[in-house]
Image: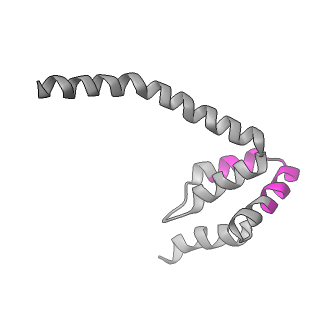
Amino acid sequence: MRIQSVGYLYGMAHRIKPLLIVHVYVFLAVRCIRNKAAHFATELYKSMKGLGTDDDTLCRVVASRASVDMVQIKQEFQKMYKQTLGMFCAVSVLSVFYL
């Protein structure tokens, strides 16, 4: 009886997983539509926080945004995280070389 219930739960998890992935993509799309600058500021913060940086995300966001968008993203970043994007980037990227 116990083995059947574990198998049942395992099967349910595989059926639910695609639905959860769709909901995550919808959530990200809605967040981006509501406030594009805040979305990209959050993506930049996530790419640089903690140990190491996610270089792919960092380069993708910076390279794909126009200079007008980057001004708005910098303002939103400072408003959200109480630190300038340049200082946060310098500390997180340079700290890799000093560790």
On whether residue 62 falls in the magenta region, the answer is yes
User: Is residue 3 shown above or below 74?
Assistant: above
Horizontal relation, residue 10 to residue 49: left or right: left
Q: Please tell me which residue is depicted at 84% across the width and 55% down the height of the picture.
A: 72
User: Is residue 89 shown above or below 64?
Assistant: below
Nearer to me, 10 or 64: 10
User: Is residue 24 shown above or below 62?
Assistant: above
Q: Please tell me which residue is depicted at 65% across the width and 55% down the height of the picture.
A: 44
On whether residue 87 falls in the magenta region, the answer is no
Q: Main secondary structure of the magenta part?
A: helix
Residue 69 location (% of width, % of height): 83, 50
Residue 34 location (% of width, % of height): 77, 42
Residue 5 location (% of width, % of height): 19, 26
The answer to which quarter of the image holds residue 79 is bottom right
Residue projecting furthest to the right: 68
Q: Please tell me which residue is depicted at 55% across the width and 28% down the height of the picture.
A: 22
The answer to which quarter of the image holds residue 95 is bottom right
Horizontal relation, residue 99 to residue 49: left or right: left
Q: Please tell me which residue is depicted at 25% across the width and 23% down the height of the picture.
A: 8
Nearer to me, 91 or 17: 17
Q: Give the colouring mode of the picture.
A: one colour
Q: Which residues are magenta?
A: 58-75
Nearer to me, 73 or 9: 9
User: Is residue 69 shown above or below 6?
Assistant: below
Quarter holding the N terminus is top left
